[in-house]
Image: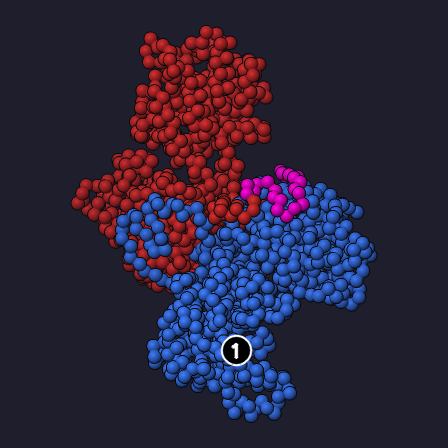
Chain colours: A blue, B red
Amino acid sequence: MVNETQHACSASSSSRSDGGSSSGSESSKDNSRCSTPVLDADRHERLREKMRRRQDAGDKWFSLEFFPPRTANAAVNLISRFDRMGAGGPLFIDVTWHPAGDPGSDKETSSMIIANTAVNYCGLETILHMTCCNQTKDDITGHLQKAKRLGLKNIMALRGDPAGEEWEEEVDGFNYAVDLVKHIRNEFDDYFDICVAGYPKGHPEAESYEADLRHLKEKVFAGADFIITQLFFRPETFLKFMKDCQAIGITCPIIPGIFPIQGYHSLRQLVKLSKLEVPQEIKDVIEPIKDNDAAIRNYGVELAVSMCRELLDSGMVHGLHFYTLNREVATTEVLKRLGIWKEDPRRPLPWAVSAHPKRRVEDVRPIFWASRPKSYIYRTQEWDDFPNGRWGNSSSPAFGELKDYYLFYLKSKSPREELLKMWGEELTSEESVFEVFTCYITGEPNRNGYKVTCMPWNDDPLATETNLLKDQLEKVNRRGILTINSQPNINGKPSTDPIVGWGPSGGYVFQKAYLEFFTSSEIVTALLKVLKKYELRVNYHIVNVKGQNITNAPDLQPNAVTWGIFPGREIIQPTVVDPVSFLSWKDEAFALWIEQWAKLYEEESPSRMIIQYIHDNYYLVNLVDNDFPLENCLWQVVEDTFELLN
Amino acid sequence: MVNETQHACSASSSSRSDGGSSSGSESSKDNSRCSTPVLDADRHERLREKMRRRQDAGDKWFSLEFFPPRTANAAVNLISRFDRMGAGGPLFIDVTWHPAGDPGSDKETSSMIIANTAVNYCGLETILHMTCCNQTKDDITGHLQKAKRLGLKNIMALRGDPAGEEWEEEVDGFNYAVDLVKHIRNEFDDYFDICVAGYPKGHPEAESYEADLRHLKEKVFAGADFIITQLFFRPETFLKFMKDCQAIGITCPIIPGIFPIQGYHSLRQLVKLSKLEVPQEIKDVIEPIKDNDAAIRNYGVELAVSMCRELLDSGMVHGLHFYTLNREVATTEVLKRLGIWKEDPRRPLPWAVSAHPKRRVEDVRPIFWASRPKSYIYRTQEWDDFPNGRWGNSSSPAFGELKDYYLFYLKSKSPREELLKMWGEELTSEESVFEVFTCYITGEPNRNGYKVTCMPWNDDPLATETNLLKDQLEKVNRRGILTINSQPNINGKPSTDPIVGWGPSGGYVFQKAYLEFFTSSEIVTALLKVLKKYELRVNYHIVNVKGQNITNAPDLQPNAVTWGIFPGREIIQPTVVDPVSFLSWKDEAFALWIEQWAKLYEEESPSRMIIQYIHDNYYLVNLVDNDFPLENCLWQVVEDTFELLN
């Protein structure tokens, strides 16, 4: 564990150890830059470096391939799948490029936008496929520029299928993947990591296996960083291919493409497209069970596991690439059985870090968007710098407007009918709204027997950590303190704690208790009287939809509410209650009442008017108990408030 | 205590509460600026604002006037006095301007350099006096530019005494203080706060009391911010003067100049210079006791206390200005009896903050210079920004060179003879050096009966906090672990703790245990073996004079070793162990062996050769125990090391 570096420095006082890029008084130009404690080498390495580091360390890894969805709803589902499968710790995912589907467009289903979402909103290292055949140089450069702009750092350079049968080479055109590789290196220098495809059986159109190997070598020598192979059915196919590559001087990583058979028809289609032949021993097993999906999938998993084991045991393979067909079960099972799915990945920070290169240094966010991280990323996408002055007073730039509610990653995952069942076909009073909040907290079915599994402010069931506060939350929601965000206080738990831990091991994490809720002006009046007694122990911000704002925060400074102390590092304070951004959050939090809830009902309907009334008259309140080593006093504050009202 | 601000904001999402100077995407240009949590409004206000805030809050304050010393030794003493009297919490000090003494020069005794030292090294808000009579415009502008460059923000604009008796007004020259006030405002706009002198009895050369009041009004209307008065003997003199000023429209603060009588001769001299008359009732008391200094001083203190009480009780006086005559006892006693001397001033940070405007945002320093803050300030004076990227990796600029050893504020306060008595007229072995270190720790006299009250690395006796570690320190120094810096671990003590507390009240302070020492290569070898067992719990840096450097710090990142958590604020981490600056400190720490210790002895003498041997062969080691909630393991590390050696 000990990284003992010895480096001799000259004895002169101006000598510097490495790591200092500048010296002398000129260096001071850079000093105002906020340099962030690096939590995790992963965040600063490019993909090919991560790959090399994993290989050097002897760590086995995996990656996942997806294709772009056809509909917006399918896109929402795919993104949830990214989040779930991302939790298993893939080194990267990749998104295929479908020339027919307008892959470079801004449509929510385009390859470009799906890859953008994976990088920026799901925090996944992502490779975007790109084909060059039948496209102009300008088109391709345009796609690459856009990818760069969106924060994509990796391209899989492919030829693509020629349109029609009469394809002929164009002079000076993009005829082969190697042309695209050269173009990327010419136009974008070393910005992108480039991946190319390898064919363990030779490309079906190649003159010969050997000729195809020579083409592959050309692609690598033109600037490709690594190779992912076409699928294959026998481990020896890949191992022979790998040795043949090495024999002709290809030294970059070669990652086997694994295709767990998931069904009879998908296999037939894939085989047709790839012009591969299924070995007789596999056909013999599959044909008799071709109508039994579960049996085929079980067989596919067995087959993949045994092939992967053989590959890994060979010592020549460090990573496995999975053709998921956008499905979860089979691939996840193979990975779990291989023991390379991370059951409990260590969180580098208490929130999911975006993989956008510009955001890699981001290490602090306001707590308000804790349940809406994608919205936060969306609304701060125009920012140039992260962290943003550590949220120091007056340096927060403006948040993006709320006008883009239609954007699919800000919408609820549930359809209208489901939301109505959860939140009430008909509301009769403010109390029926209290009930919805209470059912969400308790997990009990509502009066119509439906469980409330999401709310406009929380698209997922209650977090494990929030569950610690469940009993108190239930009590206060019943009485009209409608909680939308909270965290318990923590006075130095190990950074490896399974529920609240984050960051490198050997550290300690801390939190101040936090509670955020909507409530009536009547309750706010009583609350303010109670808060006077607590003086500076409790910081509060209370705001209504019109922006009337009551606070005791000194000089509008941010309050750090989550922080961690680690060996050999500066202190990390990843979550703050920031008074300035609270006013941007306020707009979003109030708007969700209308956009997600009120609009479920007819205009002028009583249900809609109840939500509208709450929107117009309630206050959004947040409370921080600064005395984190003592028992959380926020429940007492609320208790005192109710008592005062009685 | 609760600062409840209500401010209405428009409901639009782009609306901002105040405090945000920028909006829209253009604002992001400023975002990379590291904005620091403001601990203390004092650090960002100019003097006239501080004065106004104190007045509004009903706080009484005091200020202290000093004159520049004649000799370098006297300068060293005066600076120590600044440190001691600064601890009582003056709102500012001022340094007089002696035209005959080359006041604008770089001499260590010049008014300019003394004021510079007060601001930059002692962290005191400082007014520099400046006279204009018989000087050219260019001279004056040059002095003002230099003052600005040094970080001085306040000027007391005076005419000064004309040279000789035949003084005549010069056309277009600087004939009166008002000319200097106008000049400062013309040339430097609002950069400086300007103070002018008021004469409660009228200036001795003025045509009349009324004419002098009109002159004063001119000075104020030309741009002066406040008035300090000449001394006076009766409170009613000042109170009448103040009413008369108000009557003619002078509304700025008027601060009474208080002169505690400290001796017969100094009183007579002052009276002669100021052309004031001592009231008969005072003469009557003083004349009979004129040879009894103590009696006169006691009387002077009584008189000053009663006059100050009357002034403060009038409700018209908020601050008192003391003519100290560079003496400590009388003024301190008056202040203590008035109850406005701060016995236990709250420390805004664990180290003394410099008052240079550029350094006001400084909130983190390396721990190495903890006992040599003036050297740290000196060596970082060329830096453009504080904090310096929060010491994030690779952004520390170069430290100033060590060549300027002659600078008086880097020298020891003790003369050579005293140092020899403390550190040994003759050294016979390395062990006799161990003894010196041990005596410094224990406070016991050395074998010749002298107490060791300072060391080359610590110009003062052991800090109260270090005293907590005294027993362990003694043990290890005896055995050749020559400690020069240490702090205990602290797991969340109140920020108001009298020994280790700092920062605003209501917070919690934390520390990681730290130990820094010189030791032999033999001990280092054993230590490194022991440290392997502790893995990342203990971070270490071990370096010799040649710069051979052994460390387990990840990526040369700084390790925060002192931090505080406060209500409504980001986390403050004012002290770090920074691997890069450690190499600059190493040069200084090793050089002190030679410059301060070895050079006490003759060249080629055995004593000198022993120190030279240590300098050439020992290592400088620092250790941090990252597990601050557990018992400090560093003593065990050292214990294990000794055990391994036996």
The residue singled out by tag 1 in the image is A164
Residue A206 spot, x, y in % from top left: 42, 82
Camera-side residue: B386 or B446? Answer: B386
Mark 1 belongs to which subunit? A
**Label 1 Cα neighbours within 10 Å, binned few <14 / some 14-19 / many ≥20:** few
Q: Is residue B8 magenta?
A: yes
Relative placement, left or right, of B254 versus B622 is right
Q: Is residue A426 left or right of residue B627?
A: right
Residue at (43% x, 70% y) in the render? A173
Residue most extreme to the top: B207
Q: How far from the left and from the top, in percent, is residue B347?
A: 49, 39
Q: Nearer the viewer, residue B206 or B78?
A: B206
Q: Note whether B542 is above or below A550 in the view shown.
A: below
Residue closest to the eye, A427 or B247: A427
Percent of width and height locating residue B468: 44, 47
**Which residue is depicted at the point 52% across and 46% down?**
B26
Locate residue B575, reporting x and y percent: 44, 47
Q: Quick one: B454 or B290, which is closer to the camera?
A: B454
Q: Please, what is the dominant secondary structure of the magenta stretch? A: loop
* Quadrant in the picture for the N terminus of chain B: top right
Residue type beneath disc 1: Gly
| Local secondary structure at mark 1 | loop
Q: Which residues are magenta?
A: B1-22
